[in-house]
Image (tube, helix red, strand yellow):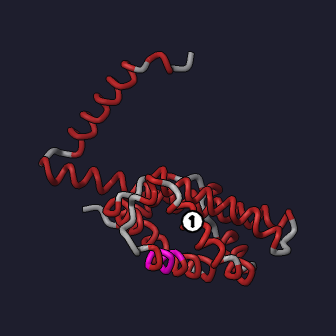
Amino acid sequence: MTTLVDIMNNVFQAMPENTRFSESDAQKIQENSTVLLDLGDGLISGFYNTVFSHTATASVFEDNERPMREKSLTDWWKRTVNGPFSDEYWAWQTYVGLLHIKRGVSNPMMMSMWSWILDYLNKELVQAGLSETETNALVMSFQRLSSTTSSLIGDSVFRFYLEALINATGFKSSLLERMVKNEIDQLLQDNAQYRLT
């Protein structure tokens, strides 16, 4: 059985070091924690205004659930801004991937809302008094946070779908992988008009 730590380690090994979140990124966030925490209320309300204004993302939630989800995002924001970025933090982000599966949050939903967060920070940090240079450096730290957490969440979704299939069917992982590759080969063949020449 794959563990959250296994996924975390596999993702970190797969990502080139300069593309994933680093200690200097953590320091950059901590140095700006006051302004980031001050932006929290606007981030939370804007995030969920966006989510609830779109039919596909709104359909993930039940009636009257918004206050609870806003509290969850507020907790995530405070924990992220205050650190530390320990193995526990990254395992927690991987755990979120499992919650996404259960709730029906797709990877495109998650990645698009990460993009929304980055856009929000890019606009609001300058208005909060940070220079363009400081804002760019801080947003780049959050971009690496985004790519690291998105990789963890995306990989946890994939691996646990795969494990569920293996457990449900009794197939060996090598057989299932071969079947997937065969299906991909057929899909590529059926759509050969899109191949780059």
Q: Which of the 4 quarters of the picture holds residue 31?
A: bottom right
Q: Using the image, determine if residue 171 lies above or below residue 85.
A: above
Image coordinates of residue 108 in percent, x first then y, are 48, 50
Q: Quadrant of the N terminus?
A: bottom left
Q: Quadrant of the C terminus?
A: top right
Image coordinates of residue 175 in percent, x first then y, are 20, 38
Q: Using the image, determine if residue 191 lies above or below residue 104.
A: above
Q: Is residue 70 magenta?
A: yes
Q: Nearer the viewer, residue 46 or 100?
A: 46
Secondary structure mostly seen in magenta is helix
Q: Residue at x 48, y 16 (%)?
A: 193
Q: Nearer the viewer, residue 1 or 68?
A: 68
Assign a secondary structure to mark 1: helix
The amino acid pointed to by label 1 is Asn
Region of the chain picked out in magenta, as a range: 68-73
Residue position for label 1: 49
Circle 1 residues within 10 Å: few <14, some 14–19, many ≥20 = few
Q: Nearer the viewer, residue 28 or 100?
A: 100
Q: Residue at x 62, y 67 (%)?
A: 46
Farthest residue in the left direction?
Answer: 170
- Left/right placement of residue 51 relative to residue 171 reads right
Q: Is residue 85 magenta?
A: no
Q: Which of the 4 quarters of the picture holds residue 74?
A: bottom right
Q: Residue at x 52, y 75 (%)?
A: 73
- Left/right placement of residue 127 relative to residue 105 reads right
**Residue 123 appears in the picture as rendered:** yes
Q: Residue at x 70, y 70 (%)?
A: 24
Image coordinates of residue 60 in percent, x first then y, are 39, 61
Image coordinates of residue 28 in percent, x first then y, are 72, 73
